[in-house]
């Protein structure tokens, strides 16, 4: 095990690669925004823990969108399509809904074949039915006669009274999001019902529902956007493609994978995470435990757990069957002559004859499987608990400890950021380390497993040193009566441990994302070396094979 001085001395090995903890710049670089760009609410005056943790990962390749940001983007797209195609905003909305809010797709399709698009979407240029000027018109729903000015028609020309329009629109809104693609009430008529009709005939309550569906469609139909999965959160995430890092952090403090919406799990892939979550929630491990730690009663077949040392078992009422735990035969046939209460000669002799081999093998396999799963799950859960505790400790440090430490050590809080940085590093490393145990559980290759466990052990060792330093040694200075000369040494030590731990985890993450390719490269080089040596031996005449060949020729 390396000493803390060894770790601090390894500071120079820090890689220059872009890592998932920092964006390659300072906090000032991260908070710097273009004055012309809209503020999407991602960087706020009071930055919460999730955003601070996110700043320790790779370049920010996403934007957190609040409701007002979504509406602004939505209206910008509608206005752009309306202006370019010279159509109303209501018609532009219909087009965008049809093409899943893809402005480029709308433009491509429209300019390729405008007539086909109009027909497919329901934006008609001329009526499909003609009406005479003056006179009465019959409503197509209630079949009552109305004056011309009392009926309302879409571009198709089918007449309906205001009362029927109101009922038709209200019913479809209350049926759900399908109202966004509403067509003319006339059967088989393709004319689309635009936003202007909803504005005219929907009640205030129905309008709120409609615009909620309208807003949600902008996110749910857009491949680059997703809602934050946190309960009650109404933010969305706009993701920029071109990176393998899918971990994002919402301003509500929820960190998740944009690809599968599970909690953030880099460097482990989504498929492995899905397998692990299914395993944790499935009944398979319960059955493995039952199989490994219980046996069926020979009479009623209910599983029974042995909770005492004696082999004399009594099934629960109403069965009450008494039997031997080892051979499962009736206890009446047992006694001192069969080995007493703690052994069974019958079982031993039967086992030698192979009668219990299959059952014992099955039970042993279940036991080994359960022990292996328990090993990985306990460490996975332990790191999750440690991470949650670290988040709480960070919040406590920001609210109480840093101010107190600043007063005791006569040091400005701005010069105590190294403590916050250490906690942020711990939080992120605990998350990574947690998911490496899920990765390790499904890693079959023996050679790769050895390399993986080495990297994992190095990273975990460094993390434990860092965690201990910031958690225990900091308390000495918090409880001091005055400033201490050792505080600068503590600063240097903690900063160094933070940097070294960061490097260890960079190496671990990089190796896992490359599929532990270094092992394959090493094996390939070793194979070539062996092949080269073998070739030289055969061609050089110095090996045993050459000697035998000459000997045979001589004979």
Image: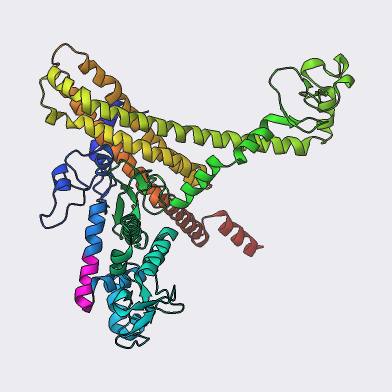
Q: Quadrant of the C terminus?
A: bottom right
Q: Where's residue 21, x and y in %?
A: 27, 43
Segment colored magenta: 76-87
Q: Residue at x 31, y 60 (%)?
A: 241
Measured from the top left, where is residue 411 in percent x and y? Answer: 11, 23
Q: Is residue 469 left or right of residue 29?
A: right
Residue closest to the eye, 501 or 7: 501
Q: Nearer the viewer, residue 13 or 105?
A: 105
For image coordinates 61% across by 58% down, the residue present is 548
Image quadrant in which the N terminus is located: top left
Residue 34, given in percent of the width and then of the height, sits at: 12, 55
- Residue 391: give x, y in percent of width and height: 31, 32
Q: Nearer the viewer, residue 522 or 268?
A: 268
Visible residue check, residue 442: no
Q: Nearer the viewer, residue 77 or 237?
A: 77
Q: Quadrant of residue 552?
A: bottom right
Q: Quadrant of residue 93?
A: bottom left
Question: In this rendering, does residue 134 appear at all?
Answer: yes
> Looking at the image, which residue is at 14% across and 22% down?
406
Q: How many marks?
A: 0
Q: Is residue 82 magenta?
A: yes
Image quadrant of residue 416? top left
Above or below residue 507? Residue 466 is above
Colour scheme in use? rainbow
Residue 201, compared with residue 415, is above or below; it is: below
Q: Is the residue 139 above or below the residue 417 in the image?
A: below
Magenta stretch: helix, strand or loop mostly: helix
């Amino acid at each position: 095990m390396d000493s803390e001085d060894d770790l601090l001395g390894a500071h120079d090995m820090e890689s220059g690669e872009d890592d998932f903890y920092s964006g390659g710049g300072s906090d000032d670089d991260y908070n710097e925004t273009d004055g012309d760009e809209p503020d999407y609410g991602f960087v706020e005056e009071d930055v919460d823990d999730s955003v601070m943790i996110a700043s320790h990962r790779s370049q920010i390749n996403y934007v957190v969108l609040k409701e007002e940001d979504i509406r602004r983007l939505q209206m910008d797209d509608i206005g752009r399509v309306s202006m370019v195609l010279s159509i109303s905003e209501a018609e532009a909305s219909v087009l965008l809904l049809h093409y899943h809010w893809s402005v480029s797709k709308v433009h491509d399709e429209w300019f390729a074949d405008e007539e086909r698009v109009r027909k497919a979407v329901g934006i008609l240029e001329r009526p499909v039915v003609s009406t005479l000027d003056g006179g009465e018109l019959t409503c197509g729903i209630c079949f009552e006669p109305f004056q011309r000015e009392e009926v309302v028609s879409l571009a198709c020309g089918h007449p309906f009274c205001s009362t029927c329009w109101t009922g038709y629109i209200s019913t479809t809104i209350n049926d759900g999001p399908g109202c966004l693609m509403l067509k003319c009430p006339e059967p088989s008529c393709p004319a689309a019902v635009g936003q202007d009709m909803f504005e005219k005939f929907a009640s205030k309550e129905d309008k709120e529902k409609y615009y909620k569906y309208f807003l949600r469609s902008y996110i749910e139909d857009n491949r680059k956007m997703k809602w934050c999965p946190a309960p009650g959160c109404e933010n969305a995430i706009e993701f920029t493609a071109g990176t393998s890092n899918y971990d994002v952090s919402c301003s509500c403090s929820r960190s998740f994978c944009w690809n599968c919406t599970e909690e953030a799990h880099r460097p482990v892939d989504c498929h492995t995470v899905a397998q692990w979550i299914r395993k944790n929630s499935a009944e398979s491990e319960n059955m493995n435990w039952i199989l490994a730690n219980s046996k069926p009663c020979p009479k009623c077949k209910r599983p029974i757990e042995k909770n005492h040392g004696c082999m004399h078992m009594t099934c629960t009422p109403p069965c009450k069957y008494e039997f031997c735990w080892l051979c499962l035969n009736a206890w009446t046939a047992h006694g001192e002559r069969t080995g007493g209460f703690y052994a069974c000669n019958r079982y031993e002799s039967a086992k030698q004859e192979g009668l219990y081999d299959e059952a014992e093998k099955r039970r042993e396999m279940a036991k080994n499987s359960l022990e292996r799963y328990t090993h990985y799950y306990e460490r996975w859960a332990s790191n999750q608990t440690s991470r949650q505790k670290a988040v709480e400790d960070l919040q406590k440090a920001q609210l109480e400890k840093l101010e107190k430490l600043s007063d005791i050590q006569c040091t400005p809080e701005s010069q105590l950021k190294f403590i916050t940085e250490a906690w942020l590093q711990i939080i992120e490393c605990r998350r990574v380390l947690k998911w490496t145990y899920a990765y390790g559980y499904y890693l079959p290759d023996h050679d790769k497993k050895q390399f993986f466990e080495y990297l994992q052990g190095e990273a975990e060792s460094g993390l434990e040193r860092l965690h201990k330093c910031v958690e225990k040694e900091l308390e000495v200075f918090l409880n001091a009566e005055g400033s201490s000369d050792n505080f600068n040494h503590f600063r240097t030590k903690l900063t160094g441990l933070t940097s070294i731990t960061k490097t260890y985890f960079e190496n671990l993450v990089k190796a896992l994302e490359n599929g532990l390719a270094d092992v394959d490269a090493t094996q390939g080089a070793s194979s070539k070396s062996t092949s080269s040596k073998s070739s030289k031996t055969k061609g050089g005449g110095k090996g045993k094979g050459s000697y035998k060949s000459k000997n045979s020729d001589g004979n």
